[in-house]
Amino acid sequence: MLPTLMRIATLVLLSLLLSLTLASRVAAHEIHLQVSPAPASLIQLQYADGQPFAFEAYELYPGNADSPAQVGRTDAQGRVAFLPGDTREWRLKAHTADGHGVDQRFQVAPADSTATTGPAPGLDHFSRLILGFSLILGGFGLYQFFACRKKKTRP
Amino acid sequence: MHVPDGFLSPQTWIPAWGLAIGAWAWAARDLRRHLDEATVPRLAMLTALAYGLGLVMVPLPGGSSGHVLGVALLTLLFGLKPAFLAYSGVLLLQALLFGAGGITTLGINALALGLAGGVVALLLFRLLRPIHEGTAVALAAWGSVMTGALLLALVLGAQPLLASQADGSPLFFPFGWSITLPALLIPHLFIGLGEAALTLLVWRHARQRGWRLPSP
């Protein structure tokens, strides 16, 4: 009787140990989600006409690193959010398969954690558009004034 | 379709700049022969139109977007050389003011879109004009867009082969030809239709107004 009880007790103990081992392995596949507020920087990407650079692939590199610290896709508004930490200088590569995108270095200001990307940040979109038209018309005007030959007139 | 800075390896953009400088010098050499007091304001107006149109992204089937160029329009109405120079100026302004395109990539953008696109437009127009002028204009415009798209797809898709890290990951544009060719050519089938319609519209109006065509 006693050996039978011992055998049963051993089996129960082994089953318990096996269950605990399997349970820890199963728990290793579980993903825990934790949400907490943190100071993030936001990059906004958009086409020249103001349309968002939405759902496109990007890579974010800290400093001169060869490997990206963050990869993913922009959101529906063409935004990328990241946590700069103590790193001030960053590089963003974002591209579509048809050749649109940016490869740009930028600084993250430590105090307000805002960064501005894009050319001619001093002018808004409309001003840059008008400046372009002015340069084209003015350039051709100067060519007309200084270099152009007179219109051929019929005799 | 303008390739931005950072997408092309120096092995690509430095020779392209060299070729483009040669092409710009060639185009500027006898510019005065092609332009007079009547044509310069017209060229200025349509160059400004190309500049504006190049900044307007039109949504396309499949979720992508694109823009028309205006290269065929400039080439057919003013000749290859003035059109190439004018469109190069457009690309420069779009890159400097809007970041649409780039400075290092200006050479390849100008050669692919402005020069090759213009050459194909001119060839198709001259080939098809005896058959039907309107069709010739439309196909010339469509062909110029497709030519630019094809060349840029080939250049972009070659980047993973031209420059990569020791582990094989690409240093510049990451997609190969199997992705770039359909990604550029399929949307530009539709963009080409828009380009053809716009070019034909302006072309007909210009002809009705008695604009003189450029000499071959």
Image: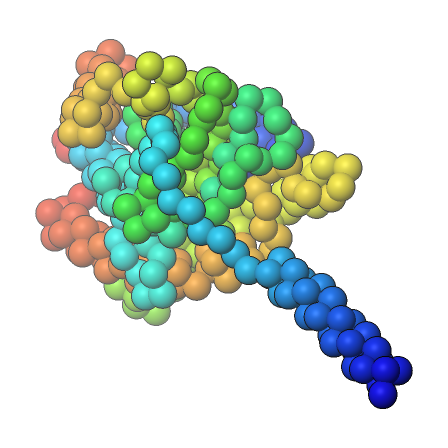
Residue B110: which quarter of the image?
top left
Residue depicted at 57% across the width and 42% down the height: B173
Give the residue at the far left of this rendering: B209
Residue A28: which quarter of the image?
bottom right
Residue depicted at 16% across the width and 48% down the height: B206
Tell me if residue B122 comes above or below residue A49 in the rendering. below
**The C terminus of chain B lies in which quarter of the figure?**
top left
Along the line of sight, the residue nearer the viewer: B111 or A39: A39
Q: Residue B146: x and y, percent? A: 44, 56
Q: Is residue A150 left or right of residue A107?
A: left
Tell me if residue B113 comes above or below residue A116 in the rendering. below
Along the line of sight, the residue nearer the viewer: B211 or B162: B162
- Residue A42 seen from this side: yes
Give the residue at the far bottom of this rendering: A1
Residue B170: which quarter of the image?
top right
Give the residue at the far top of this rendering: A146
Q: Residue A9: x and y, percent? A: 78, 76
Residue depicted at 78% across the width and 72% down the height: A14
In this picture the colour scheme is: rainbow
- Residue B34 seen from this side: no
Q: Is residue B157 left or right of residue B55?
A: right
Tell me if residue B112 comes above or below residue B188 in the rendering. above
Along the line of sight, the residue nearer the viewer: B128 or B111: B111
Along the line of sight, the residue nearer the viewer: A30 or A3: A3
Q: Residue A107: x and y, percent? A: 42, 18
Residue depicted at 18% across the width and 34% down the height: B45
